[in-house]
Image (cartoon, helix red, strand yellow):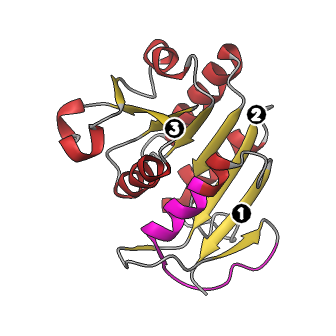
């Protein structure tokens, strides 16, 4: 059974990813959240919950040690959190990471709102980890799985993509961690 840690489990996208992982049925899911009271019972049920902050390395280490894969779904000081996560993963021998960034982080001039997402992508991409950076288009709540993937350096195509589509894509990588290994990809609806 794979052990997967979701960092930022109260986010709107993370809820879909957690549901996808529960549907797969062969995954031991752990959640790292700053405030466990913000987790609904339907999300946390069947999961191991760690209360902590990605800015605190000892709290991160408690959650990361023993995991097979870490899924990062955060906002805020992504540079500091990204550095902490990468450092703790490397120290703990956890090699596989999937990080959610944003579409448009390679457009110039870079919009200020996207700077933290670019920093996170740069930190993860230059690490020694086996990473997949996912740069989704805007999210929708549409009940569909319909997406296209583009690689870094290719033109970003399509438009807003459903959270369910992104979750399905993340789930496929978790099932087969060799997929999109050391890749930086965009995802959108065509």
Q: Nearer the viewer, mark 1 or mark 3?
A: 3
Quadrant occupied by the N terminus: top right
Tell me if residue 103 comes above or below residue 24 in the rendering: below
Q: Which label's residue is closer to the chain start, 1 or 3?
A: 3
Q: Position of residue 90 (x, y in %)?
A: 71, 21
Q: CA distance from mark 2 to mark 1?
A: 16 Å
Q: How much space separates mark 1 and mark 3, taking CA atoms?
A: 24 Å
Residue tagged by mark 3?
Answer: 27
The circle drawn on residue 129 is 2
Q: Position of residue 52 (x, y in %)?
A: 36, 23
Q: Is residue 160 highlighted in magenta? A: yes
In the picture, measured across the screen, residue 154 lies left or right of residue 176, that is right
Give the residue displayed 48% in from the left and 21% down from the top.
60
Residue at point 78% right, 65% down? 152
Mark number displayed over residue 185: 1
Question: Helix, strand, or loop for circle 2?
Answer: loop
Q: Residues within 10 Å of mark 2 (few under 14, many from 20)?
A: many
Q: Residues within 10 Å of mark 3 (few under 14, many from 20)?
A: some
CA separation in Å, label 2 and label 3: 21 Å
Q: Which residues are magenta?
A: 154-171
């Amino acid at each position: 059974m794979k052990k997967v840690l979701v960092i930022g489990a109260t986010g709107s996208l993370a809820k879909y990813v957690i549901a996808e992982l529960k549907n797969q049925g062969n995954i031991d899911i752990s959640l790292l959240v700053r405030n466990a009271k913000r987790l609904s019972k339907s999300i946390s049920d069947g999961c191991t919950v760690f209360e902590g902050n990605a800015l605190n390395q000892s709290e991160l280490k408690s959650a990361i040690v023993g995991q097979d894969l870490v899924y990062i779904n955060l906002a805020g000081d992504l540079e500091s959190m990204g550095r902490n996560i990468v450092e703790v993963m490397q120290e703990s021998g956890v090699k596989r990471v999937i990080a959610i960034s944003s579409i448009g982080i390679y457009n110039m001039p870079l919009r200020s709102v996207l700077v933290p997402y670019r920093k996170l992508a740069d930190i993860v991409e230059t690490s020694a980890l086996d990473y997949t950076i996912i740069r989704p288009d805007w999210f929708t709540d549409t009940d569909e799985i319909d997406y296209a993937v583009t690689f870094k350096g290719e033109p970003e195509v399509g438009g807003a993509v459903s959270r369910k589509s992104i979750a399905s894509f993340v789930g496929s990588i978790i099932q087969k961690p060799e997929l999109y290994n050391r890749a930086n990809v965009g995802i959108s609806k065509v």
